[in-house]
Amino acid sequence: MKASPVSRLGVRLGSNVDGFVFEVANGLHDPEVGLAVVGGSMPDPEVMWEEHGLGQTCAYLELHREAVLNPDLGPAGDRPDIAERLANDDERVRFSGIIAAFGLERAENVNAMVASLREGQGRIGGHAWIVQETARLHRRRAILRILHAAQAQPDRPFAQRLGEPEPLGRHSAGADTTVEHLFVPLVLLASPFTMGLVAQRIVKEASEAYVLVLLFGDDCGFHLRDGDVLWADLYETWAMWRDPDRASLRWIQEVTAPAARLPGQVLIEWWTRGLNRLLTEVTDLGRYRDADGRLDARNAYREIRTLDRMFLNCARIQSRPDDHVGRVSAAFEFFDLVPSILPVEVGAGQVYETLMHPTRVEAILREAFAQAPAQVCAHLRERTAQVVAHIREETLETVVPGRRVDTGVLVGDKQRSAMPPDDYVAKLFHQLRNTHHGYELDRHWKRDLLDSHSGHIAYGFPELVVLLTVALVADSESALSGSWFSANQ
């Protein structure tokens, strides 16, 4: 189900109270922004980013294997408190020290730390990479944010906005420009084990941002376990959510642990390439062209931020493997966000009847992972089969006694022909989502569906969201074009 080749379209930027945006937007024509005129006439021509016009992937993220930071930029003082954490024998404290040091220590100290990590982890197949977020990514996201604000308040002068406390340069180095969260699902691919860690460094005076990605090494990871007792633990009344020996947690470990054996260099290069393709698609100006040929900047900015939220929900799922309730909540939110990243209208029912239909979603994921490196593809496809089978089996096993028959599940009082198993799973999860959100079930058939089931939500459900997030990286064109849903309309 590969997406058809993307047709890149130009857009007009429209006007503001003080003139046409193409002429008055300060910074829009900086060479590093890379804006190209592709048609129309002045003062409001059709434009697109240069790479989109050439059919190229935007090099938004640059992966460096041996790079060091500029010692003349960033924090100037030493941090003894961080150095103390780096020397701690507890790996959790030490890892938090690495993250803090990368963001807050002097560049000389960070370079020495990264060199030590590369040497130490290199002996066991690991490494520490620095990912640089290019100025082009910063500037383009900043411009979309400014254009969004201008369209939301069209009567406010554009020049006035750019002269306020957050001009373009500061927008480019803002806290929400980091892509740290886009790499977290990678290092937690073996959750409940972490294969590494991710840290960020923002150098505001140079409008630069960096991400440190550390992978411990082949088949090497640390179990994500709670540290000292937290206040919330004192009020935890259901021991089953914290039971480390329960069958569901063991099942998750068996499914995810093989990810730790994937070669780190192959994994990080594939993931970074995928993120560049994903960000290329989501920043395509023509994607947000309205019926009049103008850029809908509000829609563009909303979609970019929605994508961020989807990755953060995936990280919430992976980082709390023992919190089934929290994982389910994050999974439902992920599904709620899916329609917001699509250029076609897809309702919640269609989302669930596609992505929670075991046969359909397995086919989608197998195709999405087809172009991944051979070892990565094999793992993800096997993992998909296990997760999908688990969701189907556990959902059907918890059907109300007497409703399960050989051909599926009997739904409703009249008990006509049974609903096929895969259709039942998809439709049931849609209604479980509705009750989770507190929606009123306004149709009798919705209540019939819930009455046929115990209400137990399969432990594999959040794991499916992890796979869907990986699919966004592996095959962004199909994911963002809406082609996943084209066969189920």
Image (cartoon, rainbow, N blue to C red):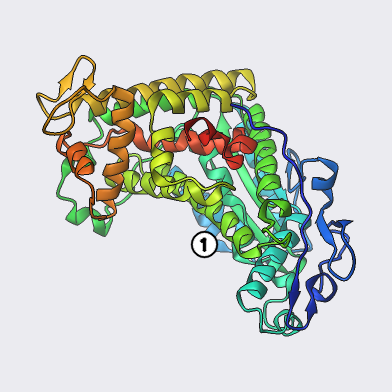
Residue sitting at the far top: 406
Bin the neighbour count of mark 1 within 10 Å (Cα to Cα): few under 14, some 14-19, many 20 and up. Answer: few
Residue shown at the point (72%, 52%) measured from the top left: 286
Q: How many numbered marks, from 0 up?
A: 1
Q: Residue at x 57, y 24 (%)?
A: 367
Which of 81/440 is in front? 440
Q: Check the image and report above or below for 371 versus 238.
A: above
- From the top left corner, tell me how far across and down residue 115 is, in percent: 69, 42
**Residue 265 in view:** yes
Q: Position of residue 278 (x, y in %)?
A: 65, 43
| Residue 76 can be seen in this image | no
The residue under label 1 is 81
| Element at label 1 | helix
**Residue 61 in the image, given as x and y percentages of width and height:** 72, 46
In-front residue for pair 173/488: 488
**Residue sitting nearer the eye, 90 or 238:** 238
Quarter of the view holding residue 54: top right
Left or right: residue 2 versus residue 195 is: right
Q: Quadrant of the N terminus?
A: top right
- Residue 273 spot, x, y in % from top left: 70, 37
**Residue 223, quarter of picture:** top left
Q: In the visual, does 371 lie left or right of 52?
A: left
Q: Name the residue at 52% across, 52% down.
A: 340
Residue nearer the viewer, 410 or 291:
291
Instruction: Report the side of 451 relative to 435 (left or right).
Output: left
The kind of residue on which mark 1 rests is Asp
